Image: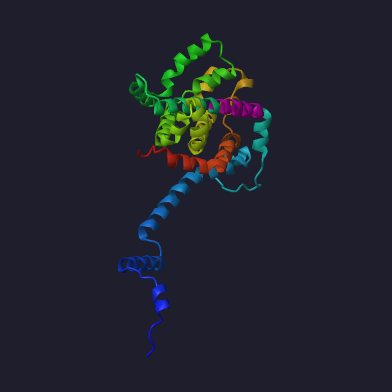
Amino acid sequence: MSAANPTTAALTPVVPRERSAAVAATSSRRRRGPAPARIAAFVILAVLAAAWLVPVLWAVLTSFKTEAEAAAMPVTIVPENGFTIQAYLNVLSEGLVPRWAWNSLLTSAAVTLITVTISALAGYALSRLRFAGRTMLITLIVASIMIPGQILIVPLFHLMLSLNLVDTYWGIILPQVVAAPMVFILKKFFDQIPFELEEAALMDGASRFRIFRSIVLPLSRPILGAVAIFVFIGAWNNFLWPFIVVNDSNLMTLPTGLQTVISAYGIQYAQNMAQAVLAALPLIVVFMFFQRQIIKGIATTGIAGT
């Protein structure tokens, strides 16, 4: 009998029994396929996704029908005469949709820029600076989240009226730029940034603003992107405040302007659905391009438990 090669024996890895048993169990589970609990979870999520998508699909299909086919009974998914874009042409020709869309884009972008700037500065100050009344201020910010925005409509309107900002872009923008939830979210994120990263800059004589601009903001891009998207979507969808503060049709935002078209022409199902699709389309595009930032920002904020 020949002796075993010592070189081969030395190169053969020794696998502990526990590790080999775990590897064997994992391989066995993979051969058996996914667990029943995972299958059930996927089925439930698929049902919920379908329940959410069916109304959206119905709105899109209805928007490509004529008014007679949209109101016909029994309801049909595919019209007999085929689909048409007449509802979209009517919406674009009867109202000031391009103007309203530009107003929504302008005001939403301004609200987003100012809100993110104010919230980031306030969140960093509450996270890093120690001053009298800091704890009380944080408590007030958290408590203000529970106050419904509708309660502030009357005093805000009186304020805009006294400042001569009714029927102006600034009248739409300024009351929306203070967002307590965003201040709290950014404060929680800044708490997770190690202070040691800022100590060297402080020792070199850098100011707090320089540290905030050069160190903290580059590390906070995911959460800043998520907050910006949340604020933009909220400002774009805001109907009540622009409806109250603006009476000039040339200054109306898209949700407000589309409502005036609905009121003027009565219930027209195809056109109503076309208006809804046009109003939601920019938000869908924004979400498709920035969904990674939204998910990454939520995952790194710590609002779920820290």
Please, what is the dominant secondary structure of the magenta stretch?
helix
Q: Is residue 216 left or right of residue 41?
A: right
Q: Looking at this rendering, what residue extends furthest in the left direction?
A: 18
Percent of width and height locating residue 204: 48, 29
Percent of width and height locating residue 300: 43, 40
Magenta-drawn stretch contains 105: yes
Q: Is residue 285 left or right of residue 118?
A: right
**Quadrant placement of the N terminus:** bottom left
Q: Is residue 168 left or right of residue 126?
A: right
**Quadrant placement of the C terminus:** top left
Residue at the spot 62% in from the left edge and 37% down from the top edge: 67
- Picture mark count: 0
Residue at the spot 52% in from the left edge and 30% down from the top edge: 213
- Residue 51 visible somewhere in the drawing: yes
Which residue range is magenta in the image?
Answer: 95-111
Q: Looking at this rendering, what residue extends furthest in the top direction?
A: 162
Magenta-drawn stretch contains 286: no
Q: Nearer the viewer, residue 134 or 272?
A: 134
Q: Nearer the viewer, residue 209 or 231?
A: 209
Percent of width and height locating residue 129: 40, 25
Quarter holding residue 35: bottom left
Q: Looking at this rendering, what residue extends furthest in the front direction?
A: 204
Residue at the spot 39% in from the left edge and 33% down from the top edge: 191
Residue at the spot 45% in from the left edge and 29% down from the top edge: 203
